[in-house]
Image: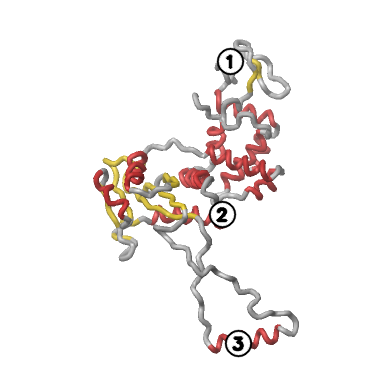
Amino acid sequence: MNLIEINEQFPTELDCIVHLEKVRYGKKPKCAFCDSVNLGVRLKDHRFTCKDCRKTSSVTAGTALHGTRIPIKTWFYAFAIISDAKKGVSALQLQRNLGVSYPTAWKMYMDIRGMMVDDNAKLDGVVEMDETYIGGKPRKNAKMMLTDSQKEKLDHKLYDLKEDFEITEGQYKKKYPKVKPKRGRGTTKISVVGIVQRDGNVVAEVMENLTARNLRKMVQENVKESDSILVTDEYSGYNRLSEIIEHIKIDHQKMWSYKGINTNSIESFWAIIKRGIIGQYHQVSPKYLPNYVAEFVFKYNNRHDDDMFETLVKNAVKTANP
């Protein structure tokens, strides 16, 4: 749902609240404390007083939006903006779109990431498993050597430009650290492990300790071992997974794919995450990285759904004890 549709379907704050009530309760609103439908008239702040337990509650009581002072319509706008951005949107952009302060936009975004949960069935069929590492500075590009003729042309060009522009030699050289950060396994970057079903859903989690035990546990929790074939690379941590599931390993030093056996799907998912972090967020702290990963997982798993807005609305009014 886009912003124009939100304005058309929910022109007022009350319309937004009524929609939340239908999603949470069904045809009739109920008391958030005792589930009674014996309610009084709606108060000026759109709350109800229960005639049975005598408590006053709103539709957001006990949900992810509990106690919010932000209008529900603003939340609806945020749901639409965030769900429409495949690679995410910065909190600064959200601030400008919603007309709120930066801390409010950041907090709203983090709360919405908390709503991005899926109760999906276990993965099966051909599943791919891999890990990636997030963080650190972009690596330095290889040094390009110019030919003598190219240098001569550039020197002539710079000489002509000096008449109109002040050009200082070496002014734009960028300094790089002498010690290059290690890439891949053994790096100080944060490891994220993912499992994806071919043409299906993905699960991913930040894994501080990349051990065989933790990898095995992740497979057992998210994959139907008896109905699946697991494809990984040659990392030794995956070796013992053959004890619980059919396991095929691809040696990436020799080939990337063999007769359709590859890890291209999970690699594509990593590309989406990294492009989103580099292009939108620029850097992510280890503390909040799981929230960002959850956002990308949610959007990937709902990529065939034309409207993630309603999914976020449903998740927003879920309670701990439905």
Q: Which residue is mark 1?
A: 37
Q: Is residue 282 above or below residue 24?
A: below
The picture places residue 45, in percent across and down from the top left corner, at 71, 24
Which colour assignment does the render follow? secondary structure
For disc 1, the neighbor class at 10 Å (few under 14, some 14 to 19, many from 20) is some
**Residue 181 left/right relative to 158:** left
How far apart are the alpha carbons under marks 1 and 2? 48 Å
Local SS, label 3: helix
Amino acid under disc 1:
Val
The picture places residue 47, in percent across and down from the top left corner, at 67, 22
For disc 3, the neighbor class at 10 Å (few under 14, some 14 to 19, many from 20) is few
For disc 2, the neighbor class at 10 Å (few under 14, some 14 to 19, many from 20) is some
Local SS, label 1: loop
How far apart are the alpha carbons under marks 2 and 3? 39 Å
The picture places residue 316, in percent across and down from the top left corner, at 56, 33
Q: Which mark is residue 153?
A: 3
Q: Which residue is mark 2?
A: 283
Which residue corresponds to the image point at 55% horizontal and 57% vertical from the top-left?
278
**Residue 95 left/right relative to 111:** right
Between marks 2 and 3 in the image, the one whose residue lies nearer the viewer: 2
Question: Is residue 230 something that shows in the picture?
Answer: yes
The furthest residue to the right = 164
* Front residue (pair 268, 15): 268
How far apart are the alpha carbons under marks 1 and 3? 83 Å
Q: Earlier in the sequence, mark 1 or mark 2?
A: 1
Q: How many marks?
A: 3
The furthest residue to the left = 243
